[in-house]
Image (cartoon, rainbow, N blue to C red):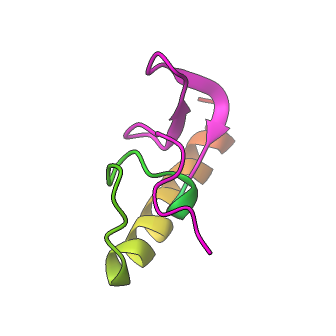
Amino acid sequence: MCTHAGLEIDHNAAVLDERGRPIPGLFAAGEAGGGVLGSRYVGGGNAVANALTLGRLAGQNAASGR
């Protein structure tokens, strides 16, 4: 099965701590990162678009050392 709304992330795909601050060097995308879509799983093509878009964004930010 899947998480359907994983770790909370920001607009850079950075995982947020319990106070809402980005955790340095930690990024999530797809179903592992549910912050952009909220606490609901919207399913279908939206899940694929989320995984592709945030996966690319997370990779770029991780590679840049943000």
In the picture as drawn, the residue positioned furthest to the bottom comes out as 44
Depicted 34 relative to depicted 12: above or below = below
| Residue in the picture at 35% in, 50% down | 39
In the picture as drawn, the residue positioned furthest to the front comes out as 1
Quadrant of the image occupied by residue 32: bottom right
Across and down, in percent, residue 23 comes to 61, 25
Quarter of the image that includes the N terminus: bottom right
Across and down, in percent, residue 26 comes to 66, 36
| Residue in the picture at 37% in, 40% down | 11
Is 61 a magenta residue?
A: no
Across and down, in percent, residue 48 comes to 44, 77
| Residue in the picture at 49% in, 67% down | 51
Q: Which residues are magenta?
A: 1-28
> Which of the two residues, 2 or 34, is positioned nearer the viewer here?
2
In the picture, measured across the screen, residue 45 lies left or right of residue 27, that is: left
Depicted 18 relative to depicted 53: above or below = above
- Count of marks overlaid on the render: 0
Quarter of the image that includes the C terminus: top right
Q: Main secondary structure of the magenta part?
A: loop
> Which of the two residues, 22 or 2, is positioned nearer the viewer here?
2
> Which of the two residues, 29 or 31, is positioned nearer the viewer here?
31
Across and down, in percent, residue 5 comes to 46, 55
